[in-house]
Amino acid sequence: MQDMLRRYGFGLTLAMCLLVTFWLVVLVIVPNITLFEQSFRPYLPVVEIGGPRDTYSFANYLKVFDGNVDKSLFGISFSIPVHVYTFGLTIFYSMLVTLICFAMAYPLAYYMAKIVNPRSLPTLILLLFIPLWVSEVLRAFAWWIILAFKGPLNALLMGLGLIEDPIRWTNMGYTGVVVGLIYTYVLFMLFPIYNGVQSLDTNQIEAAEDLGAPWWKIHWRIVLPHSKPGIASGSVMVFMLSAGSLLVPSILGSTTSQWFTQTIDQWFKDALDWNTASAYAFLLLLLCTVFVSVAMWLFKVKLSDIAK
Amino acid sequence: MHKFRQNLAHLYTVLFVLYLLTPLVVMSGAAFNDSKLPSIVPWKGWTLMWFGEMISDQRMMLAFANTLWVAVAVAGISIIVGTASAILINSVSGRARTALYGMMISTILIPGVVIGISTMIMWTKLGGALFGPEGKPWPFIPGLHLSILGQVSYIAAMVMLLVLARLQSFDAGLEEAALDLGASHAQVMRRILLPHLYPAIGAGGAVAFFQSIENFNVTQFTRGGADTLTVYVFSKVRSGITPTINALAFLLICVTLVLAIIYEVNRRRRARIEAARQAEARRAEEALL
């Protein structure tokens, strides 16, 4: 700090400190504290705000447990609050998306880092980057076209004789959402893993080959452990983006798929109950924090490794 | 066996690239289909009608203009805030650095929905507390300016990371020398530190600009009645859509492709020059020996 004063003088140092304060306090901390505070207040008409009924309670959070629905899973039927159910499914499908993204991205990341001719690598990366530059809403829209009832996918499958009748892809629970999320976010898994694998010394792989290790053992014992920070970082990114996505579930969702962010959106925009929306948003934030912490602890990586 | 696995890897990569690009091709193709629904099957003949309709769509043009100025504003503010944060982080150490850095990084991980709602609530509540519930003045009403602030809250962190990485290669001795030779603090900043950071600041500005164009979650909750392109496309997709969106998508993809090709051609030219230079150096070395 003294160092900064000496280099840039009082005025510039103060200006920089004020800018950082503006960012962290005005744009991040105070809004989140307001969100937290509002989430404990009831939703009241304007005239009653500050009145005797405006007291703190957990009522907004307890709304999560309202309204049971009957569901059955693996033949066991049970009754579960609808929002808890949505919350659980959002986490489950986000994890599924993360897992599939990993399975798809890992071989390609390894290929890019170790197999491909280094001279054609920049071209390959450029090709992979193109969908990333096209905005998320258009990427989801592209799949909306493909998965449509009379769309190209059904036409192709029927043309090949694989199916007899067209399939309603976007009306099969979470299928559309999962397909869309994978397409939208798989690259956020690819590049961190690529960075991880790339720093591995190729000699280690060759040594293992010379000593007779089968290919799966090389991956399991050498490549995977080495690229762990990259995998953790990619997984955290994909999970957070999926669980927090509102676009893809809204565009590709079916009548039976509800994403937790959509529930928040409905409280905010349809019910105009900002307080309950705050409570739900806070739950989402809590979930994300817990997930990131657990992932960092499991993979033994630091926050600074993730945000690369 | 080894050869076989290698071919498999090549095949997988080709399939992966196809998987990434086919949806974009399908989407672009639908822009030229003479059909009321955006699809490529059944093909009803070529048309350029949708491009004409897109140009005459006033709301879309307005949304496009909104998107541009929001993105420019976000990029501008993020550059200033992000650069200041990077310089500050770089000159503190120990616990303060860890805490500050952690806080800045964690903004990237906050879900957009949370940022949107919290920004919206804070500003409108603040306005309500200062001016009463009715007739709150700007900036305490919903609108794109709140979207800008919400977007800056996490995009600034990305700029910060880029600038911080560049700062690692900065030689602080240059600043010392300038100060010893009588430069003012402002001169040190403007003539020595900032020129070194310009590449990172430029990259940060580009990242911020594109992140802002992409943004949906924050904008959706804070925009009030105004549209940005993402929000407009979203509402179009949800209500009855016409292939005007495809026409827009096609144009955006074309812009992306042109930029990508320019970049690639440039890179190849530089690589060729570099290779020629190395060959020259090798020849010179051999001649000396």
Image (spheres, coloured by chain):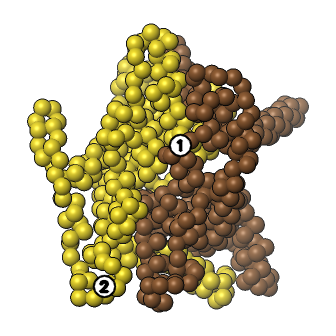
| Camera-side residue of B209 and A11 | B209
At label 1, which amino acid type do we have?
A: Gly
The vertical placement of A194 against B75, above or below, is above
Identified at 42% across, 20% down, the residue is A166
At mark 2, the secondary structure is: helix
The chain that hosts pointer 1 is B
Residue named by callout 2: A48
Total labels drawn: 2
Residue named by callout 1: B240
Identified at 50% across, 60% down, the residue is B220
Q: Disc 1 versus disc 2: distance between alpha carbons?
A: 40 Å
The quarter in which the N terminus of chain A is drawn is: bottom right
On the same chain, marks 1 and 2? The answer is no
Q: Colour of chain A?
A: yellow
Return the x and y of residue B13 as percentages of the image width and height: 55, 25
At mark 1, the secondary structure is: loop
Colour brown belongs to chain: B
The quadrant in which residue A271 appears is: bottom left
Tell whether A239 sits left or right of B257.
left
At label 2, which amino acid type do we have?
A: Glu
Tell whether B111 sits left or right of A273.
right
| Camera-side residue of B128 and B86 | B128
Identified at 66% across, 83% down, the residue is A12
Return the x and y of residue A170 as percentages of the image width and height: 40, 34
Tell whether A76 sits left or right of B22.
left
| Camera-side residue of B115 and A300 | B115
Bin the neighbour count of mark 2 within 10 Å (Cα to Cα): few under 14, some 14-19, many 20 and up.
Answer: few
